[in-house]
Amino acid sequence: MIFEVKFPTIWANFDANAHMRHTAYNDYAAEVRSRFFASQGFSLTEFAKHNIGPILFSENTTFFREIHLGENITTNLELIAASNKFERFKFKHQIIKEDGVVSAEIIVYGAWIDLTKRKLTTPPQAMVDKYKEMPRSEKFEIIPLKNAQ
């Protein structure tokens, strides 16, 4: 099962060429990650209670088809890799046009940071437990912590 959210596009996300600006794709992906974690009981408020936050090491976007002003999109999220206790994660997002054509694919690689110590950390056990139940990509891989790159 892939988590997805439908969005109406907004004028502010378009450039002078009347297609969606490149950074807007990543903004939609970030919004889907935020909504996904909230749907699992880990909203930004809940992260603050646990004194943790997500950080990204990399965010790679590949563009296939442009999105034009007025088109609506669906943005999804799929867990493609993670370490055993969800200390590190990789998600794949697809930005899909109304006609079903994939417009872009975004791969993010991240981890959790202790907001006081400013060091990488393991998420709370409740999140680790939720992680174990998350739907995974058919090609899901374990990220070994010794080589967490």
Image: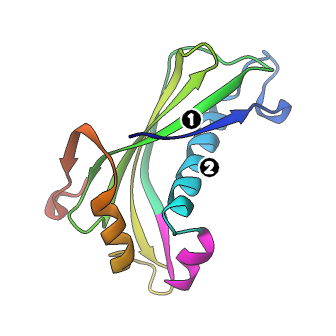
Q: Residue at x 58, y 40 (%)?
A: 26
> Of the residues shown, which amino acid type is indicated by label 2?
Glu
Question: How far across and down, in percent of the image, does residue 105 sit?
Answer: 46, 29
Neighbour tally class for label 1: few under 14, some 14-19, many 20 plus, Cα within 10 Å: many
Q: Earlier in the sequence, mark 2 or mark 1?
A: 2
- The span from disc 2 to disc 1 (Cα, nearest Å) is 9 Å
Question: How far across and down, in percent of the image, does residue 10 sit?
Answer: 81, 33
Q: Secondary structure at mark 2?
A: helix
- Compare residues 101 and 103 and report the one nearer the observer: 101
Q: Read off the magenta span.
A: 44-54
Q: Residue at x 31, y 67 (%)?
A: 87
Question: Could you tell me which quadrant the N terminus lies in?
Answer: top left
Question: How far across and down, in percent of the image, does residue 27 sit?
Answer: 64, 43
Q: Determine whether 1 is above or below 125 in the image.
A: above
Q: Determine whether 128 is above or below 16 in the image.
A: below
Discs 2, 1 touching: Cβ within 8 Å: yes
Left or right of 124 on screen, residue 33: right
Q: Residue at x 82, y 20 (%)?
A: 16
Left or right of 8 on screen, residue 44: left
Quarter where residue 66 is shown: top right
Quarter where residue 111 is shown: bottom left
Left or right of 24 on screen, residue 8: right
Q: Secondary structure at mark 1?
A: strand
> Of the residues shown, which amino acid type is indicated by label 1?
Thr
Q: Which residue is mark 1?
A: 75
Neighbour tally class for label 2: few under 14, some 14-19, many 20 plus, Cα within 10 Å: few
Q: Which mark is residue 31?
A: 2
